[in-house]
Image (cartoon, rainbow, N blue to C red):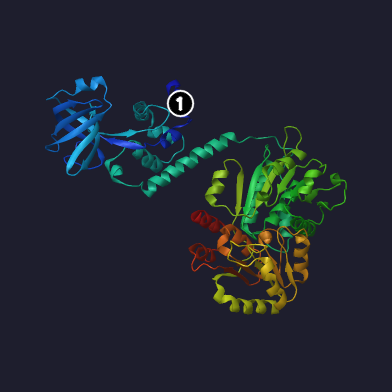
């Protein structure tokens, strides 16, 4: 929308760039310049008054008013008066005055009365880059419905927000804003933020632009892809065909089948090369195994810190850990990052630069199992395209329960029952070593009990240099794994049916959901026990009733 010179000048002073942002500069208070017959204590009020007496002291003017709208006299005081004020206050003159009225011991007085020439309206007061009266005149002239409609704001949102500027008397009585008004302000803030993000979005020419096919491959898979997997693959297919380097984040709940989307993307990019970076050797290994299994005709290589150096330019699909950043990489038309939140921005952009060709960029896909609320995904989609996978290929059957010390005997019986069916159990402790502060056992304190009463007990934690090997050994031949939250993301444990989380109230709901997602990966009946010393926790009670990662993310926001 083209702005006039005057509007642009005032927008610059207010540090805004649109009428939407102008509407968001809401008043901090209001002057109620209507006459009321009843005196209200501790509020600013307008009076219709005749001056009965004036006394000039050293630093004050003491005045007695007869107030016609109240029908009685009140005293008033002006502190540090200016000389001209004395001439305005002649005995016998009748005018309108506005000021704060307070009452003590039955006596009412007005402090700092200000002579008013216009009355009968409610005037908003602003704290901004313009003087309040100048701002109000600017609002009256420029803040019109049609200007906001042109910027894409819906009519009902406009009505709610304009009522804060062109105020109706009911708003003055309310202690808090009504919910629909608050929601309207939130909508406008998001709208303005998304426009700002969209304006900052930079576009680059892609290294490759093509339409890849996936349908024949999908039909040959030993299982059927979910509708959301297919929808996400189609989003990526469309991205690849455009004449700009795409940036897309795929957010999929735990076990939603993001791996198949990764493989479909690499397939659609053929004959051009794809690179995938994963946060751990275990995860890179798993992805390599899956890729080898489901893309049998594609030349695939695994790159970790222990890999032998080979000529990477001979391969179509390179899968690796951050070790990729320290290798000479051939150009790649597609770069993918799994569990993207585990890498810093610098690492992700470093990978991007390694395979870019001057101003041309590869297509870029980020994958994350950490659920984010839909609204957040929508906001960020102004800056990066987002696909959500909210369903899983098969329905998980996991019972979640909050347990206490009194339930321990029952828990032991449950664990013995699961192990008798050749299933595995994970017990997550909050600390590795004993703590004076925390009222829970650490791994070191607890491991003796489990090792004494059960066989094939494996122990690992974040500082354990052998943790990846321990997880692999446990997967093959373990009964119980004792660990910290190091297992939150990564290795697939097909026989794991039970997770016990000690001190569950200390963890975020998204972390609890990730840990719960370790069990029942192959459709087995799963159990998640949240052990706490707290008598009650509404947060944990809400968690056990909620299974969708996206609903968990909204709960997490609610309880923060």
Q: Which residue does the image show at 14% across and 36% down from the upper left?
A: 69
Is 306 on the left or on the right of 237, as rendered?
right
Q: Looking at this view, is 299 or 309 the one in front?
A: 309
Query: Can you see residue 272?
Result: no
Q: Name which quarter of the figure residue 246 lies in.
A: top right
Percent coordinates x, y for residue 470 in the rendering: 76, 64
Percent coordinates x, y for residue 253 in the rendering: 61, 57
Q: Name which quarter of the figure residue 133 lies in.
A: top left
Image position of 532 with respect to 263: above or below: below
Q: Name which quarter of the figure residue 54 lies in.
A: top left
Is 230 on the left or on the right of 94, as rendered?
right
Query: Can you see residue 215?
Result: yes
**Total count of labels:** 1
Q: Looking at this view, is 460 or 187 the one in front?
A: 460
Looking at this rendering, what residue extends furthest in the front direction? Answer: 58
Image position of 367 with respect to 418: above or below: above
Percent coordinates x, y for residue 318 in the rendering: 79, 49
Image position of 186 with respect to 458: above or below: above
Q: Which residue does the image show at 27% across and 41% down from the upper left?
A: 169
Residue topped by disc 1: 13
Q: Residues within 10 Å of mark 1 (few under 14, many from 20)?
A: few
Is 375 on the left or on the right of 335, as rendered?
left
Q: Looking at this view, is 79 or 5 the one in front?
A: 79
Percent coordinates x, y for residue 177 in the rendering: 36, 46
Q: Which residue does the image show at 38% across and 28% down from the upper left?
A: 142
Judged from the image, the secondary structure of the residue bearing numbered disc 1 is: helix
């Amino acid at each position: 929308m083209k702005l006039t010179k005057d509007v642009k000048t005032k927008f610059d002073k207010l540090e805004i760039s649109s009428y939407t942002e102008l509407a968001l500069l809401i008043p901090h208070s209001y002057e109620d310049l209507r006459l009321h017959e009843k005196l209200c204590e501790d509020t600013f009020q307008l009076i219709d008054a005749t001056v009965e007496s004036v006394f000039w002291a050293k630093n004050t003017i003491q005045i007695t008013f007869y107030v016609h709208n109240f029908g009685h006299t009140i005293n008033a005081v002006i502190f540090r008066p200016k000389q001209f004020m004395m001439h305005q206050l002649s005995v016998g003159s009748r005018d309108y005055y506005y000021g704060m009225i307070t009452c003590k011991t039955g006596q009412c007085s007005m402090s700092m009365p200000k002579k008013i020439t216009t009355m009968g309206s409610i005037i908003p007061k602003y704290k901004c880059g313009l003087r309040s009266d100048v701002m109000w005149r600017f609002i009256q002239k420029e803040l019109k419905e049609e200007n906001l409609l042109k910027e894409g704001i819906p009519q009902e949102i406009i009505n709610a927000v304009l009522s804060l500027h062109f105020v109706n008397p009911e708003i003055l009585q309310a202690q808090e804003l009504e919910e629909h008004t608050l929601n309207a302000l939130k909508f406008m803030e998001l709208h303005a933020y998304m426009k700002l993000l969209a304006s900052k979005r930079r576009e680059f020419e892609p290294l490759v632009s093509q339409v890849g096919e996936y349908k024949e491959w999908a039909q040959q898979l030993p299982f059927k892809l979910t509708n959301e997997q297919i929808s996400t693959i189609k989003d990526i297919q469309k991205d690849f065909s455009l004449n700009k380097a795409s940036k897309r984040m795929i957010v999929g709940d735990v076990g939603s089948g993001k791996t198949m989307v990764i493989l479909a993307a690499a397939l659609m990019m053929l004959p051009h090369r794809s690179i995938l970076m994963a946060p751990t050797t275990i995860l890179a290994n798993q992805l390599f195994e899956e890729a080898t299994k489901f893309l049998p005709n594609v030349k695939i290589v695994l790159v970790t810190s222990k890999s032998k150096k080979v000529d990477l330019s001979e391969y179509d699909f390179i899968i690796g850990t951050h070790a990729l950043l320290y290798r000479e990489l051939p150009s790649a038309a597609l770069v993918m990052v799994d569990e993207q939140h585990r890498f810093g921005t610098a690492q992700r952009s470093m990978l991007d630069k390694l395979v870019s060709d001057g101003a041309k960029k590869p297509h870029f896909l980020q994958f994350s199992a950490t659920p984010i609320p839909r609204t957040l995904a929508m906001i960020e989609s102004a800056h990066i395209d987002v696909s959500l996978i909210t369903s899983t290929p098969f329905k998980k059957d996991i019972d979640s329960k909050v347990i206490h010390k009194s339930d321990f005997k029952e828990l032991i019986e449950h664990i013995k029952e699961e192990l008798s069916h050749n299933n595995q159990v994970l017990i997550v402790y909050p600390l590795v070593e004993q703590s004076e502060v925390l009222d829970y056992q650490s791994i070191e304190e607890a491991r003796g009990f489990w090792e004494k009463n059960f066989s094939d007990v494996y122990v690992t934690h974040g500082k354990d240099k052998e943790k990846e090997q321990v997880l692999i050994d446990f997967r093959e031949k373990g009964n119980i794994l004792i660990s910290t939250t190091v297992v939150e993301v990564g290795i697939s444990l097909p026989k794991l049916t039970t997770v016990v989380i000690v001190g569950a109230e200390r963890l975020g709901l998204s972390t609890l959901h990730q840990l719960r997602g370790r069990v029942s990966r192959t459709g087995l009946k799963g159990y998640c026990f949240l052990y706490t010393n707290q008598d009650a926790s509404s947060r944990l009670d809400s968690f056990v009733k909620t299974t969708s990662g996206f609903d968990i993310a909204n709960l997490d926001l609610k309880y923060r």
